[in-house]
Image (cartoon, coloured by chain):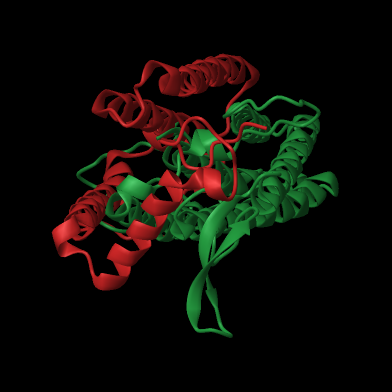
Chain colours: A green, B red
Amino acid sequence: MSHSVEYDPKEAWNGGQSPFRLSYGKIFMWFFLISDALTFGGLLSAYGFIRHKYSDVWPKAENVFTHFPFVEHHIPLAYVGLMTFILIMSSVTMVLAVEAGHRNHKRGVLIWMFWTIIGGLAFVGSQAWEWYHFIEGTDVGALRWVWDPETSHYVQKTIYGANMTVNEYGAPQFANFFFFITGFHGTHVFSGVVINFVIFMNALMGTYERRGHYEMVEKVGLYWHFVDLVWVFVFTFFYLL
Amino acid sequence: MEFHDDYPEYEKMATHDEVAGKKLRRTLWNVFWIMLVITISELVVGFIAPGKGWTGSIYLKVFFISFTIAKAAYIVMVFMHLGHEVKFFKFTILLPYITFMLYCIFICLNEGTYSGKPANRTPIDALLVKQQVDLRAHKHHGGGEQENVAEPAAEHH
């Protein structure tokens, strides 16, 4: 935004200064996020591969994720919409914490980081609830071929819910990818909450006030926005398309 | 060119005063409202799409993917502040990633479509697809009682 030091693009690479006008910590947070984004990109591309391969038997998300807490009727997409809203909201509170940090406003940083942590916990809890209903399945279940080790044959059995080998809703690969990608993302959200909490405690104890700047809040903010960014794609490719 | 080791304090470069902060906060909240509107319109379209028979159409896919990319761009450019970084840095971060991912997506979807064609299926794949199709057609024998046999395990209690 405001680059207080004069910047001449022709001189930038001559040494003695950062050509990117950034501290090494922030640059390497970006490089880490690129490598993490490649991991998620690889997973989602693999999901696309399997989905195109079994496109004629692929389950439709609006038939799978239809539950909403305290509501008897099935409302497709409503719950995941709420989860998306929670994560976007917590991204906004994070960026407001970063903004407060740029003004060296300790109280603002603490308030907004607190709400970010609450939002992150709400999201992880929602994901656990979503998993629970996906694993539990419906009351009626569905008939599926399952491998019977005793007779070494496939037998027909009524299956409830989804696990890694069989899936009530359709192709088992759907459940595999769902568990792996949302699980990997949920792990990121959880570690993000832990890191946010550490930074929150540091800010509370005045570490950054003594240091003179709140760049750590900015760095952890980058990670947190990245988690939100991944969810935007997971949301589209798992739930909408 | 003379060498100097008194590096500028890059950590403090992004600091600003109350006036600039107020302006920035307004921008951030505007971005939030834009993203909320995008998400809600995605959900509304996703909700009404099956009833209108839009499911799986190319227009629906283009709609969802372009809105997703718009949201991603807002997060990266405004929230993650990349839009205001130095041009070199923007290209360092975005160009290799986007180039590689475009290739990766192309190759995955292309190969997936190819190997999903009935003629190219391995015996075990053909078996798996056949099982799923059979089960869908004979759903009323076992699991859920449903009118709409075209949908896999649609929930109607």
Can I make out residue A18 in this image?
Answer: no
In-front residue for pair B20/B116? B116
Image location (x, y in percent) of residue B93: 33, 49
Query: From what the image shows, is residue B15 above or below residue B40?
Result: below
Residue at 43% x, 23% y is B50
Residue at 62% x, 57% y is A159
Query: From what the image shows, is residue B10 above or below residue B71?
Result: below
In the rendered image, the quadrant that contains the C terminus of chain B is top right
Image location (x, y in percent) of residue A213: 65, 43
Residue at 32% x, 42% y is B90
In-front residue for pair A62/B2? A62
Asked if residue B90 lies left or right of residue A65, the reply is left
Image location (x, y in percent) of residue B126: 28, 64
Can I make out residue A95 in this image?
Answer: yes
In-front residue for pair B146/A93? B146
Query: Where on the picture, by quarter, is residue A14?
Result: bottom left
Image location (x, y in percent) of residue A97: 68, 33
Query: From what the image shows, is residue B46 above or below residue B90?
Result: above
